[in-house]
Each structure stands twice: as structure tokens, then as C-alpha cells.
């Protein structure tokens, strides 16, 4: 189930980036919207699904693979606009992933709106990646 979610999210991001992504802000909005919308469309079960994946080594490996894939997609999408050293950008992207997961879970549970979650995540991305 989570793998299907991850594939849907990745495809959504790629399609959106093909038609836009001319600035760092555009890329941030595209990635944020895809991440939050995909999680929110899963509903309140999203948090339970990710928690369940931490229950076994096999499931933890799947979760890690999906997170790694998201980090790679972000790194590639932001590459034309970000000139941070490789180690620093990796740390920043891991932080962005944490924010993305927390905001998406809040949106999926209805604690914040999709719009507010997307806007906050976009601002976090741009603010942390610009030097």
C-alpha cells in the first residue's frame, strides 16, 4: 500500500516538474503540493500506515527506500537552483522530509488545511535551500 502511495507521489511530482519548475519557488510549490496532496488523499490512515512500516525490518527497509527516493527526486529538482555543498544539501533535504511528513500527516488528519500545509512546506524548502 505504501509503495503504491510512493509511486503515485513520485509520478505526480515528475509530471508537474515537466510542465513547470522554472524557479526554486516553483519547484518548492510543485514538490510540496504533490507530497501533501498525495498524503492527504490517503486520509487519516496515512499516519497509521507510516507507523506500521516501522514495525519490522522488512517494512522499515521499504520506508527507507521510499524516503531515499523522495530525497533523490528533491535533490535533482532543486539542483539547478541550489549551490550548497553535497553534505549540507543532504542534511537540509532530510530536514525537509521530516517537515513534509509532519505537515502531510497533519493535513491528512484534518488538523491543518492542505493549502496551509503546502504553503508552509514550500516556505521551509525555499528558506532552507537558499543561501
Image: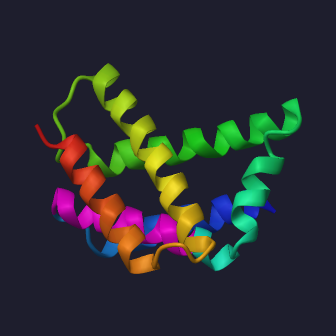
What span is colored magenta in the figure?
23-38
Q: Main secondary structure of the magenta part?
A: helix
Q: Reply yes or no: does residue 27 show up in magenta.
A: yes
Q: Horizontal and vertical percent for residue 36?
A: 50, 68
Where residue 118 sits, quadrant-wise, is bottom left
- Residue depicted at x 76% and y 34%: 61
Instruction: Name the residue furthest front.
Output: 111
- Residue depicted at x 55% and y 66%: 106
Q: Horizontal and vertical percent for residue 25?
A: 19, 62
Give whichever of 25, 95 is nearer the camera: 95
Give whichever of 43, 60 is nearer the camera: 43
Q: Is residue 44 above or below residue 95?
A: below
Q: For this view, does 88 lie left or right of residue 52?
A: left
Q: For this view, does 47 lie left or right of residue 19?
A: right
Instruction: Name the residue furthest left.
Output: 131
Picture colour scheme: rainbow
Q: Horizontal and vertical percent for residue 110?
A: 58, 77
- Residue depicted at x 65% and y 59%: 6
Q: Horizontal and vertical percent for residue 18?
A: 35, 69
Quarter of the image with the N terminus in it: bottom right
Quarter of the image with the C terminus in it: top left
Where residue 32 sits, quadrant-wise, is bottom left
Q: Is residue 2 above or below residue 62?
A: below
Q: For this view, does 53 lie left or right of residue 22?
A: right
Please give the count of numbered marks on the rendered protein.
0
Q: For this view, does 77 lie left or right of residue 111?
A: left
Amino acid at each position: 500500500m505504501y509503495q503504491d502511495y510512493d509511486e503515485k507521489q513520485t509520478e505526480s511530482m515528475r509530471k508537474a516538474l515537466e510542465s513547470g519548475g522554472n524557479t526554486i519557488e516553483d519547484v518548492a510549490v510543485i514538490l510540496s503540493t504533490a507530497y501533501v496532496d498525495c498524503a492527504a488523499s490517503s486520509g487519516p490512515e496515512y499516519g497509521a500506515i507510516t507507523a506500521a512500516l516501522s514495525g519490522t525490518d522488512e517494512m522499515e527497509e521499504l520506508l527507507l527506500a521510499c524516503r531515499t527516493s523522495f530525497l533523490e527526486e528533491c535533490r535533482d529538482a532543486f539542483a539547478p537552483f541550489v549551490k550548497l555543498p553535497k553534505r549540507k544539501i543532504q542534511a537540509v533535504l532530510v530536514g525537509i522530509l521530516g517537515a513534509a511528513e509532519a505537515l502531510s500527516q497533519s493535513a491528512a488528519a484534518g488538523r491543518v488545511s492542505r493549502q496551509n500545509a503546502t504553503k508552509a512546506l514550500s516556505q521551509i524548502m525555499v528558506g532552507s535551500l537558499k543561501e
